[in-house]
Every structure is written in structure tokens, then in C-alpha cells.
Amino acid sequence: MSELPAGVERRTVAGEERLTTAGDPVYGEPTVDGRRVWDAGRSKLGAMLELGMDTCLEGGESVLYLGAASGTTVSHVADFAGPTYAVEFAPRPVRDLVDVAAGRPTLFPLLADARSPREYAGVVESGLDCIVQDVATRGQAEVANRNAQFLGDDGLLLAAIKARSEDVVADPEAVFEDVRETLSATYEILETERLEPYHDDHLGIVARKR
Amino acid sequence: MTETEDAWFAGVDPGAAEAAAAIRESEADEPRDWPALAVESGFAADEDEYYDRLHEATVDAAREAARAAGRADDQQLIHALRAMDDAERTANELAERLEEWAGALLDVEEAATGLDFAAVVAATEPEDATEERAVSLAKRAVDLRDERDDLRAFVERRAPEVAPNLAEMAGPVLAARLISLAGGLESLAKKPSGTVQVLGAEDALFAHLRGHAPSPKHGVIFTHEFVRGTRPDDRGSAARALAGKLSIAARIDHYSGEFRESVHEDLRDRMETIRARAADAGGEGDDGAADAEVADE
């Protein structure tokens, strides 16, 4: 099993080994020793770590998080990472995201569309270490490619690709193959793995900017 | 200072109330090392101070933007959608007029039709007063098409704010169309799903009620992939299932406003079941024409 980034630790909760980070609870998640349980069933990145994918994260990275939703996962990311920019398109979840960010000084919430980086390129800095992507729109690979401009040399992409966002009826494997191909224009793909049983029809991808 | 021209903090006093507005309005072609540039330009003493100011400004900006979206108005969405349709219809009318007029008047070599033809004419250098009128009209038609595109982009952006579940399920434009046909989100939420199923097919419905036509299977929801992409034999079932879930989505949007993933999953499961029938029957297809009148996207 790959190493977890510094700041993410396994703890035994109710007889089960669970991922945890240190920070203020956000969504009523259980806590142990002052640490918050990171539920892999509610978080794609959590599932990637739980499944033992090598995310190459060490802790303390600067992060652009695309598709932050109400901030469940990004709150854990901000607990172990450095400056974290959280982009979310839908206004309603942003209300919750703002509450999550208010208590985390290096978490910056942005109401913007991840498909048009222009909207936030004047705010999000260049040379970032990592993009975490969990957007449920069509053209997910294209979103990752367009946002590669925020990454520094050898910057990382950790993406959860949702097959059904691309095509509700196509075979997920065919969708994933297209996504891999589109991504390879900009990224070198290091590892991919399906996120079952935590998330159906999702592919976790670890890639490095070319 | 040119390096920081596109920075959100350009021209902003540290800590000023305008910082949040600056975040919301900021646009840039490419990102830069903003923390370092902020320190260099004197916006912040060091990077820690910059991040503190960025944090305050982004939290305020996101809170205000989310609040403003909470006031998002279904009536404005309806106006924008109807204006989009008007702009499209008018642009196409002008394009037809131009094909007739400029087609005879100017030597247009490209085999373009409709608004593409208008665009070719608009780029032509007029040589006399008559050509001038035709070229000028072509420019207006092309502008009108651009306006249609802008209105569409506005609808695509606004519909998920007004009705997140309906927009996710139907796509933003169809969601706006359903709201428009019902006259508002509230009245859409109060309609039975059988009515939602035939919204936009009123002529066919009344013909049916007068007793000389079959009942329409679908109205504008025909444009949805779940209906159009299902073989004709199963389209009635698909339209009924989709309309049922769209009604639920509209009700969640009107009464709660929260995004709810489960209703979208329910619909996908239902659609898989319906489409599996075609596989069981060894059937193919999704050719065949629509039965009811449909407004095309």
C-alpha cells in the first residue's frame, strides 16, 4: 500500500481502519483523538487513497480543487495541504463551501466555472503542485487540459472521472479510454483505477503534467 | 506594473471593501505567481499577509455571489430564453431574405446557406448603394446570431442557479424551456407530471381532446436524449418516466433548492431498464419520426 500524505493518518474507528485528517468537523463526520474521519464513500480522493493508489502527495502541496461542491473533500485537502483554491460552479453548494472555508485560512473558495479558467486566472496563482478534479460535467478531460496552465513543472493531476457525465448510456470503459486519450495530450498518466466499491462508474486517475 | 495588470488585487486598496468585488470581476488570460507579485507591488508585506487578504476577499466574494444567485429569478430566465428564441427566429428570417436578395445581387462563391451565407455577405465590400443595404442587413443578421449565442450562454449559466436539479436532469436550455412553458418554476412544480410530459405539444393535445388524434407522447422533452435516443416503441415509456422525474426535480428546486443526487440516479436506473427492453427484443433502433409536434433545440 502506498504512503499516505503527511497529515492523513489511519485510525481505528468502531473497529475499522479509517482515514483521518486534523481540522474542524464540517459535515457531522465522526471524530477520533481530535481527528476527522475522511469517508471514502463521500469523497473520490478519499477513495483513491483508501484503495491504495499512489497519489504522489506528500502533504503541504499548493492545490487547485475543481468541483469543490459543498466542500466535503476540499476541507480534508485543506487540512493536509498548503494554499488550496476551491472552484465550484453551482451557487447553492458554495454557501456551504464558504462556511467550510471561513475557518480554514488557506482555503480560498471561488464561484466560477472550471471550464473557463479565465474567470479565476487573475486569482489562482501559477506554479501549483497539484490539481484535484471532481467535476460532473461533460468534457472532463478537456477541463483538466485547460487547467494545466496553473500547474508548475511536474505538477500533478488527481482526477475522478465520472463515466455517466460524459455519456449516460455508453460503456464506462469506452468513456474512460477516450478520457485517457484526451488527457495524454497534456499529461503523462501514472496510474488509473476504478473507484468501486466506493463510487460506481468512476475512474481515479493520477497523472503528471508533461 | 504591466505584470500585475490582470491580478485581482490590481488597483485595490488592501483590506478595502472593494476587494471582494475585485475577485468576482477579475479575469485574466493566464495565471501568474500572484503572491510574489502582490508582495513586489506592495499589496501585501509578505506572502502570509497576501494569503490572509486573499482569504478574506474570496470568502466575502463567494458568500455574496452565492447570496445573489439565491435571488436568481425564474422570470428573468424566461425572458432570456424567449429573447434567445426571438433572436434565432429573426436572424433566420433575415438570412432567408438575404439568400433571395444578395444571392442574385452578389457573386458569392462559397456554397454557404442561411446565416453562414449572411456571414459571407457581411464580409463583402459593397460597390453601390444597393449592395450597401444588403451587406448592412447581413451584418445585422450576423450580430443577431451572436446575440442569440450570448443569450444561450446566459441561459446555460442562469438555469442551474434557478433550478439546479431540473437543469442537471434536462440540461439548462430544456429546463428553461419547461419553466417558460409553465410560466414559472412554481407553476411548473405544481403541474402533474402528465402535463409536464406534453408541455409544448398543446396543439396535438387539444386535437386529441377534440377526439380526432392520438394522445401526444411528448412535448419539448422530446429533445432530451433519454426520449430521442430511445427506440420509438419505448418512447412513450421513456417520456413518461422522464416527465415524472422532471416534475420531482422541479418540486425539489422550488420547495428546497438543494441539489439531490438520488433523483438523478433513480432516473438513470429507470432509463436503463427501459432501454434494456430493446436489447431483449433484439431491436435496434432509434430512427422513426416523432409523433407529436416538437420544438427543436
Image (cartoon, coloured by chain):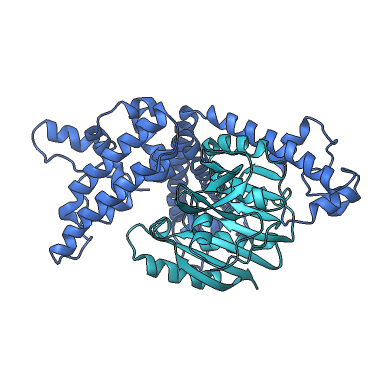
Chain colours: A cyan, B blue
Query: In front: A106, or B143?
Result: A106
Note whether A87 is above or below A58 in the view shown: above
Q: What is the x, y in percent for residue B132?
A: 60, 51
Most extreme residue toward the front is: A15
Total number of numbered labels? 0
Q: Is residue B187 left or right of residue B143?
A: left
Among the 4 quarters of the image, the one containing residue B88: top left
Query: In front: B8, or B153?
Result: B8
Q: What is the x, y in percent for residue A135?
A: 51, 53
Note whether A41 is above or below A29 in the view shown: below
Residue B293 visible (yes or no): no
Residue A176 visible (yes or no): yes
Q: Is residue A185 left or right of residue B180?
A: right
Q: Which residue occupies 30% across, 42% down? A: B220
Among the 4 quarters of the image, the one containing residue A23: top right
* Quarter of the image that includes the C terminus of chain A: bottom right
Q: What is the x, y in percent for residue B191?
A: 28, 28
Q: Which residue occupies 56% across, 47% down? A: A68
Q: What is the x, y in percent for residue B160?
A: 47, 39
Q: Which residue occupies 77% across, 35% down? A: B19
Most extreme residue toward the left is: B211
Q: Which residue occupies 80% across, 52% down? A: B34
